[in-house]
Image: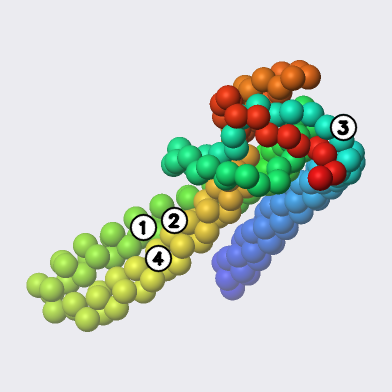
Amino acid sequence: MNRLVTACSLILLLVIFLLAWKLKEAMNEIRTANASVSSLRSVNAELSTAKQALEAELLRLKSPPERVLEGEVFIVTRGRENYKLGLVEIGVLEMDSLHELLTAKRAVASSEVARLEPFLQRAKADRDAKDSAERAAFEASLKAIASGNFEAASAAHDKARKVASAAGNHYSKLTAERKYYFSGTANVPALESETEYRPCESVFADATKQKNTFGSSS
């Protein structure tokens, strides 16, 4: 009787320890999430300020003094194919007016990637563990052919395979989400062109001998 009471007490202590450990882990994740949310709010505020500055710049450029831009305008794709726009109405923004917005967007991306990183690491470890379990179940099903327990072993392997597939899909989803935050934020090489009033940078203009007038009301 004493042994039973002792065993029950040990089991109860173990359960209490596991619950306390899980609670501590959950609280740590909550604190990490709260810190990430606070950081993201700060970055979003900076992004909002940068957007307002860009909108003000666009408003200023609606009625600029007339200047002459030398060159023809092309669209350059990621595959480095050039498409000539021809005679179209264009607007010109100095790169300096875009740097602040791009910096803020990269800060948002970095904050989100930092938030996702611990979840990504856990998902990767879980995927690897489930893959190992699936391989072990497969090998067990092969060995079970000779012992006559193939159906049970095969069912266990199918279950392990589905669990491994779900873990792999979850990891792939998190990986794709991390890649999303860096899509379109890479540094774009700028081409330099000359105007009559000052050097400027453009990510899509190529200087030629043709002159196009912009900024006029006509």
Q: Earlier in the sequence, mark 3 or mark 2?
A: 3
Q: Are marks 2 and 1 in contact (CB under 8 Å)?
A: yes
Q: Position of residue 172 (x, y in %)?
A: 48, 56
Q: Position of residue 165 (x, y in %)?
A: 40, 65
Q: Residue at x 74, y 19 (%)?
A: 196
Amino acid type of disc 2?
Answer: Arg
Task: Left or right? Give the position of 35 relative to 73.
Answer: right
Distance Cα–Cα, label 3 vs label 4:
62 Å
Distance Cα–Cα, label 2 vs label 1:
6 Å
| Mark 3 or 4: the one toward you | 3
| Mark 3 or 2: the one toward you | 3
Mark 4 — residue? 165
Distance Cα–Cα, label 2 vs label 4:
8 Å
Mark 2 — residue? 127
Residue found farthest to the left: 146
Mark 3 — residue? 65
Q: Are marks 2 and 4 in contact (CB under 8 Å)?
A: no
Residue 182's tag is none
Q: Quadrant of the N terminus?
A: bottom right
Distance Cα–Cα, label 3 vs label 1:
65 Å
Q: Residue at x 71, y 22 (%)?
A: 195
Distance Cα–Cα, label 3 vs label 2:
61 Å
Q: Earlier in the sequence, mark 3 or mark 4?
A: 3
Amino acid type of disc 1?
Answer: Asp
Badge 2 element? helix
Amino acid type of disc 3?
Answer: Pro
Label 2 environment density (alpha carbons within 10 Å; few <14, some 14–19, many ≥20):
many
In the figure, 207 relative to 181: above or below? above
Task: Left or right? Give the position of 157 relative to 129.
Answer: left
Badge 3 element? loop
